[in-house]
Image: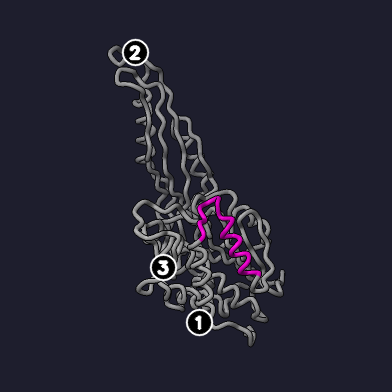
Amino acid sequence: MTISKHQRSIEQLTTEAIQLLKKLISTPSFSKEENQTADLIENYLQSNNIKTFRQINNIWAFSENFDNQLPTILLNSHHDTVKPNRSYTLDPFSPIEQDGKLYGLGSNDAGGALVSLIATFLYYNQVENKPFNLIIAPTAEEEISGSDGVELVLPQFGKIDLAIVGEPTQMQLAVAEKGLMVVDCTVKGRAGHAARNEGENAIYKALKDIDWFRNYKFPRISEMLGEVKMTVTIINAGSQHNVVPDICTFTVDIRPTDIYKNAEILDVIKQNVGCEVKERSIRLNASSIPLSHPIVQQGIRLGRQHYCSPTTSDQALMPFDSIKIGPGDSARSHTADEYIYLDEVREGIMLYIKLLDGLKLK
């Protein structure tokens, strides 16, 4: 690769990234309400002479001299946030610097990763003779796994060979993550008076199916993610103490592994329970990338550890190789007085650049 004489330094990129992050923190961007942060990101990229594209609140851009003969790497993170919880002691929309930290809603999840990926895209955009193309895609609705986020715009990108998904992982390599599927179950009985031997108790009928969810073990076990996990998390039945309930509903949280597609798991459930089963969605599949993949090996050479992530991200919507890595700490996500260390942003930019330096996918 040939570095342009106009290439910005890590220090300059870091300064600009932190300034952008402060603007993003100052701008509310709850899921489905990200139009203002989309405007900010779009304007920032355009101010750097980047041609942008937009669909609803998703922004993307292609690197210069895009060559369809080369592999393409997607740099993706999200600019939506959850709503601040009641335990905040600081203004969630005030970017406060203190003791090397930058406080503010979305600073850690996933603003730090987002601005670091944007900086990485700018760094490589003018590099000549790259062995890959880059697409930068700040997207919406990740926090709610919404249909108008990255899933909406993936068809606009063409063939993707690898995605780097920016989430707070302390710049370690999340090489796999479990998926998510939620099913709602309904058991029907027949109402009657509790004092007499009347009716058919829907709660008692539900116990058999609940016990199946509790004890069933899917036979195939993932080397990376272990067993598929199913947990009954909500149950509702009955209207008053002396009426045998005629309906019992319960909800099951299911965490699939990369060994099963969600549709396969759903088929097994329906074959084994007697209740009516209605899935909320089967979109969020598990993901994994081989440890032999060049991006993983590059990370290992840089001293990064690899692990399996317990949290779900937009990786679940990507039907191609992807890795999750970014500055910040997942343990801080969705907590009161969220923050990221300023040094973490600098490290994120530096390591993203090093991950791509000399990377060959073909």
Residue 300 in the image, given as x and y percentages of width and height: 45, 75
Which comes sooner in the sequence, label 1 or label 3? 1
Q: Are marks 1 and 2 in contact (CB under 8 Å)?
A: no
Residue at image coords 39%, 17%: 191
Task: Read off the magenta span.
Answer: 27-46
Residue 136 in the image, given as x and y percentages of width and height: 61, 67
Other-residue count near label 2 (Cα within 10 Å), few / some / many at <14 / 14–19 / ≥20: few
Q: Is residue 118 left or right of residue 91?
A: right
Measure the C-alpha gap from mark 1 to mark 3. 20 Å
Residue 153 in the image, given as x and y percentages of width and height: 64, 56
Camera sees residue 163: yes
Q: Camera-side residue: 198 or 224? A: 198
Decide: is 230 above or below 96.
above
- Looking at the rendered structure, the secondary structure element under dot 3 is strand
Q: Is residue 338 left or right of residue 56?
A: left
Q: Which residue is mark 3?
A: 96
Q: Which residue is mark 2?
A: 198
- Looking at the rendered structure, the secondary structure element under dot 2 is loop
Which comes sooner in the sequence, label 2 or label 3? 3
Q: Camera-side residue: 22 or 339? A: 22
The label number, if any, that marks residue 130 in the structure image = none
Camera sees residue 298: no
Q: Are marks 2 and 3 in contact (CB under 8 Å)?
A: no
Residue at image coords 36%, 51%: 86
Colour theme: one colour
Q: Is residue 258 magenta?
A: no
> What's the residue type where badge 3 is placed?
Ile
Q: Camera-side residue: 113 or 279? A: 113
> What's the residue type where badge 1 is placed?
Glu
Measure the C-alpha gap from mark 2 to mark 3. 65 Å
Residue at image coords 37%, 71%: 98
Residue at image coords 42%, 43%: 253
